[in-house]
Image (cartoon, helix red, strand yellow):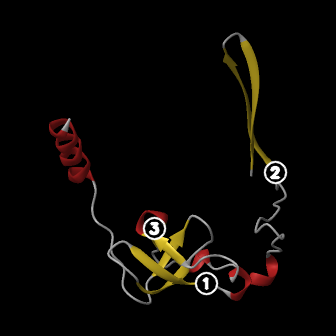
């Protein structure tokens, strides 16, 4: 069992780079959009600088929940243009239908519509 585990660990480690962030770096979180790193709490845990709107969330996250953010001016959205609901979701309205197709799956036809 140990041999199989060590073999799998070596395969995993070959494809995985350890993530580390510095104080002030911006990251994407699975919970909210980009936010700043407050400080490093442990070897794989970071305290985040969350906006006041999200003060009810726990602000310490594991490194697996974070992705490095590369700055781009097209990513900036005016905060007043998005209305968040109580459960931290928002509603988007479709602009136009981009493409339509029909896919056959197990004898059934399924309509696929790409909405932009």
Residue at 83% from the left image edge and 70% from the top image edge: 86
Q: Is residue 116 visible?
A: yes
35 or 104, which is in the foreground?
35
Q: Secondary structure at mark 1?
A: loop
Relative image position of residue 82 (x, y in whole percent): 79, 75
On the image, the x and y values in percent for residue 72 come to 52, 77
Position above or below: 101 against 25? above
Residues at marks 2 and 1, CA–CA distance in whole angstroms: 34 Å
Look at the numbered disc 3 and give the secondary structure of its residue.
strand
Indicate left or right for 115 with 59 as reference.
Answer: right
Residue 56's quadrant in the figure? bottom right
**Residue at 43% over, 84% down:** 25
The residue that label 1 is drawn on is 50
Residue corresponding to mark 2: 96
Tag 3 residue: 67
Q: Earlier in the sequence, mark 2 or mark 3?
A: 3
Callout 2 secondary element: loop
Q: Residue furthest front?
A: 1
Quadrant for residue 97, please give it. top right
- Residue 3 marker: none
Q: Marks 3/1: CA distance? A: 15 Å
């Amino acid at each position: 069992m140990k041999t199989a585990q060590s073999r799998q660990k070596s395969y995993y480690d070959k494809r995985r780079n350890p993530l580390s962030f510095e104080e002030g770096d911006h990251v994407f979180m699975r919970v909210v959009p980009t936010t700043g790193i407050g400080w490093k709490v442990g070897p794989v845990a970071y305290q985040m600088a969350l906006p006041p709107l999200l003060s009810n969330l726990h602000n310490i996250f594991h490194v697996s929940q974070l992705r490095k953010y590369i700055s781009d001016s097209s990513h900036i959205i005016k905060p007043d243009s998005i209305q968040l609901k109580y459960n931290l979701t928002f509603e988007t309205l479709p602009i136009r239908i981009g493409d339509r197709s029909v896919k056959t799956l197990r004898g059934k036809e399924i309509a696929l519509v790409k909405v932009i």
